[in-house]
Image (cartoon, rainbow, N blue to C red):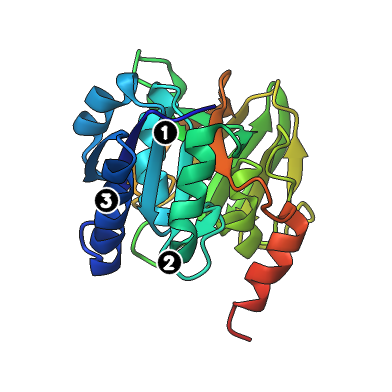
Amino acid sequence: MTARRIGFAFNPTKDAAVGLRERGADWCRMRGIDHWAAPAGALDTLLRELPTTDLLVVLGGDGTFLRAALAVAEIDVPILGINLGKIGFLSKAEAHELEPILAEAAEGAARVDERMLLRARILPGGQADGSPAFTALNDVVVARGSLARVCHLDVSIDESHLATFIADGLVVSSPTGSTGYSFSAGGPILDPTSRNLIVTPIAAYLSTIRSVVVSPEQTVRCRVVDAFEALVSIDGHEDRPLAVGDVVEVWAADRPIRLVAPAAAPPFWDLLRQKVELLPS
C-alpha cells in the first residue's frame, strides 16, 4: 500500500483533532501529496471522496474511528487511527507519531491488518421485510430501554437454540470489539485478526451460559420475548427501537476492513497490556 491521496476524518468538537488535521495537511502539502478533510460523521462527504483516496486517517478516539469506519466498510480504503481519546484500542498510533506513520504509509512500509465486520438486520415480528442491513466493526447490542426492567431474550445459533436469557441485554461482538462492551459484560478477549462472533449476555439472571464464541459461518438470532422499550444499538452510535417478537440477526460480513499500523507496532497482546495499565484501578 502506498498513499498518493490522503483523507483526514476528524472529531470537530476536539481542538486537538482540528490541530492535528492542520499538521497532517501541512505534511501533505510539503510533499506534494493530495489531501482532503471532513468530520468523521459526514458520511456523504467521506463516501464521495474515498473512491479516489489511498488512505483515510482518523483523528480522535474510538467513537470517531467507528463513525469513519462506516464509510470504509462500503468503500474499501485502508484506515489509520491516530488516538486522541483515553484508551484507544482501535487507533494504532498516537498524536506525536502522526508524521512518521504518514511517511510509512506514503512509502508503502506500513503494516495492514484485516478486521472482520459484523452485519445485522431487524426482522419485525420475526419476518423478513426487505429492511436494509447494518454494518458494525465492534458490536451489535440488544438491550433494555430507559427503565430498569430486564429483557427476556431468546437466542439461537443458526437453527440451534442456545438459551433464553433474563438479562439487561445481549452483546454480539466481533474480535475487534471483544475489548469493548463484550469484555465489560464478561466476554473473552480474542485476537482482533481472528474471525469469530462472541455472544455475551449482559448481567444475566441465573444463567449458566456466560459467553460463547461462534463460527463466522453461523448466524446469531436474538428474539425479544418480553421487554419494555427494547432497542438494538449498532457500534453504540445508531439505535433502533425493538418490539416484542422482533428478531435481530447478526452474521460475519464477507469483506473485512483494512487497518493500518506502524511497521514496528507492538503485538496485540503487548498493546493490550499497555492499554490495561492506563485504566483506573
Front residue of this view, candidates 117 and 242: 117
Between 212 and 74, the residue placed more toward the observer is 74
Residue marked by disc 1: 55
Q: Amino acid at mark 2?
A: Gly
- Can you say whether 53 is above or below 18 in the image? above
Please tell me in which quadrant of the rendered image residue 14 appears: bottom left
Position of residue 243 measured from the top left corner of the image (x, y, whole percent): 36, 39
Q: Amino acid at mark 1?
A: Leu
Quadrant for the N terminus in the image? top right
Q: Is residue 17 visible?
A: yes
Neighbor class of circle 1 (other Cα within 10 Å; few <14, some 14-19, many 20+) is many
Residue ID for mark 3: 26
Of the numbered discs 1 and 2, the one sitting upstream in the chain is 1
Q: Quadrant of the C terminus?
A: bottom right
Residue at horizontal 46%, vertical 65%?
Answer: 96
Q: Secondary structure at mark 3?
A: helix
Q: Do the residues under discs 1 and 3 have CB atoms within 8 angstroms?
A: no
- Mark 2 highlights which residue? 85
